[in-house]
Amino acid sequence: MSELVTQLEIVAQAVSFAESGKTRLLHALESVPDDKLQWTPSATAKSPLRVAAHAALSNSAFASMLRGDPMPDVPFETLMAKMVEAESAVGTRAEAVKLIEEQSAGAIVALNGLTQARIAEDVQTPFGAMPITFIMLLVGRHMDDHAAQIDYMQTIWGDNEMHF
């Protein structure tokens, strides 16, 4: 019985982190003025819209890893080029919000589908094998980290409010 409680607690915490990260990302994106959605601090930096799209799209990859889907058999550079292309295709705040909502929901379904045996496994990632518990918590942490990037960009254009 204690293993089941532990499994439920681990999954519940990961789901809670995912929901909190999604909420924080949505609030950060919501606070970006329309004229700053595509703004970048340098030619090589991502815009707030692209940062949000990246965070959303990554949830699809995290969900795939959590389910145990096989990794695509392509070079890492190809995976990253596809990510850049997909991020760049998101052109509006509404598209980004929809993507965040949909991809977060998919990651949460994958989290809720984990078994005790699966939680004990390692998962293959483009960066090598990692404990699945790391990926479980990465869903929310990744969105929260990218919300912080958007928050920082806002300070560059003079918005020093806390957007939580």
Image (spheres, rainbow, N blue to C red):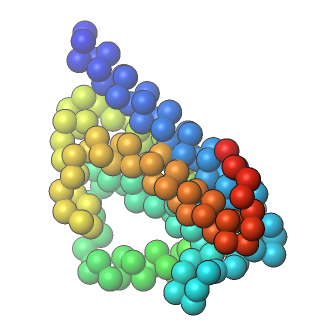
Q: Residue at x 36, y 22 (%)?
A: 8
The image shows residue 91 at horizontal and vertical percentages of 70, 75
Q: Is residue 88 above or below residue 107?
A: below
Point out the residue furthest to the right here: 34
Q: In the picture shown, does residue 105 fall above or below 155?
A: above
The reply, left or right, for residue 99 in relation to residue 118 is: right
Q: Is 86 situated left or right of 116 in this image?
A: right
**Of the pair 13 and 159, the residue shown nearer to us:** 159
At x 48%, y 38%, the residue is 17
Determine whether, in the image, residue 53 is placed left or right of residue 30. Answer: left
**Residue 120, placed above or below residue 35:** above
Residue 29 seen anywhere in this rendered image of the structure: yes
> Quadrant location of the C terminus?
top right
| Residue 32: quarter of image | bottom right
Q: Report the residue at 63% width, 44% height from top.
A: 23
Give percent across and percent down for residue 16: 50, 33
Give residue 137's position: percent from left, percent from top: 38, 43
In front of the other: 6 or 143? 143
The N terminus lies in which quarter of the figure? top left
Q: Which residue is drawn at the image coordinates 18% and 56% (left, top)?
A: 129
Farthest residue, direction bottom: 43
The answer, for residue 67, to whether it is visible in the render is no
Q: Position of residue 56 (x, y in %)?
A: 55, 59
